[in-house]
Amino acid sequence: MIENALRHKRSNRMIHFILLLYALAILIAILLFAMPSKAARVKDIATIEGVRNNALIGYGLVIGLNGTGDKNGTLFTVQSLSSMLTRMGVTVDPAAVKVKNVAAVMVTALLPPFTRPGSHLDIVVSSMGDATSLQGGTLLLTPLKGPDQEIYAVAQGSVSIGGFVGGQEGDKTQKNHPTAGRIANGAIVEREVPFAFSDMDRFKILLRDHDFTTALRLADTINKALKQESTGSPIARPIDSATVELRVSDQYKGREVALLSKIEGLDVKIDFSAKVVVNERTGTIVMGDQVRISDVAIAHGNLTIRVQTEFQVSQPPAFAPENAETVVVPQQEADVLEEEAKIVLVKGGTTIGTLIQGLNSIGVTPRDLISILQSIKAAGALHADLEIL
């Protein structure tokens, strides 16, 4: 009985052990398949030619300011106000106009693609003159024009500066930037940008980051996804490092939206050149994993020279001559402190992560690291583009 119980116990342990190994194998497989790859959706790395925002701009007046508008010396504000009143049937002499509740502003907005008349846009209002604040102001009807000088929208509404300004002179309190503000849904679209989307038989997919390898992979991915739906020549072909031409097959004639919707959801393995971006003002360094370094030795050490001057007072001793005077005697002391130089040897083919670990081990600060990277690049050992902001 005891032997049977022991055998049964060993058998249960063996079963639990096998189940544990099986679960561990499944977990490893899940982790391997779930490992992040460098693939990205087409919609995240590319755009369609012609499908873009359009900039609009206009000149207008903001009224209702509490004495914080443009001063009398701002002539274009006075002229604009006088012209507006003249168009409304009120004749005034521009030389006699003296108001502080009006400010001349520039109004800007972005018109998204396929926006129809009657849609609303957010606008940005920015002061042009010497107004101190747009707080509490109202933008009068302002036409917004495109580069072709055609009016595509009209703007009007209360300006929100997202802050405040109060007090005068030395007792002034301010939050955020009071001479620029926004008007949510402050513009109404009056005209749409002409774009014959449904009549096109070819589209051009534009990569945001130019790369020949990514363009070729994008074309191959599209052709594989639409292989059963195409006949004859491939649907997509790369033109250059930034453009892939897409041919609309007969099956998708009149269904261009469905075609682009299917393509923008495809995953493409992207490629990019090695680059190191350095911001000297903040000491920020951003590097990709493609950066490689050849054999190089790095020495790091600081030499500090400190000169200190201490002023002491020397008084004449007792029974000194009558012409003896108290004088100031400078005592100078110079110290030279040289830290022990530390050398790090980096083997060829080392990734940037290994380099950073090695430099951190010798106590390199971000600003020292910037100088080291510049020196490595100058020596020809850094195989990446070094971009300094």
Image (tube, grey):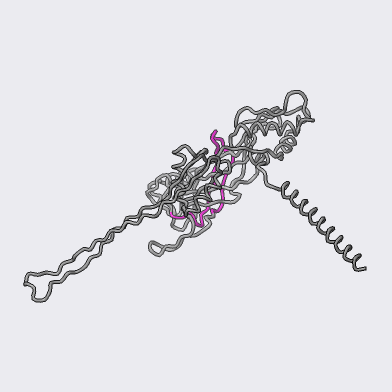
The residue positioned farthest toward the right in the image shown: 1
Q: Is residue 5 left or right of residue 323?
A: right
Q: Position of residue 117 (x, y in %)?
A: 65, 41
Per the rendered image, the range of residues in magenta is 132-159
Q: Quadrant of residue 260?
A: top right
Q: Is residue 220 left or right of residue 361?
A: right
Numbered disc total: 0
Q: Position of residue 334 (x, y in %)?
A: 28, 58
Residue 104 appears in the rendering: no
The residue positioned farthest toward the front in the image shown: 3
Relative to 263, say whether 3 is above or below.
below
Q: Position of residue 265 (x, y in %)?
A: 71, 40
Q: Is residue 164 left or right of residue 96?
A: right
Residue name at image x 57 percent, y 44 percent: 288
Residue 54 appears in the rendering: yes
The residue positioned farthest toward the left in the image shown: 322
The residue positioned farthest toward the bottom in the image shown: 318
Q: Position of residue 161 (x, y in %)?
A: 52, 55
Q: Is residue 135 magenta?
A: yes
Q: Is residue 385 left or right of residue 120?
A: left
Q: Nearer the viewer, residue 77 or 282?
A: 282
Residue name at image x 47 percent, y 56 percent: 65
Q: Nearer the viewer, residue 72 or 45?
A: 45
- Quarter of the picture containing the N terminus is bottom right
Q: Nearer the viewer, residue 280 or 372?
A: 372
Q: Nearer the viewer, residue 72 or 193?
A: 193
Q: Is residue 260 magenta?
A: no
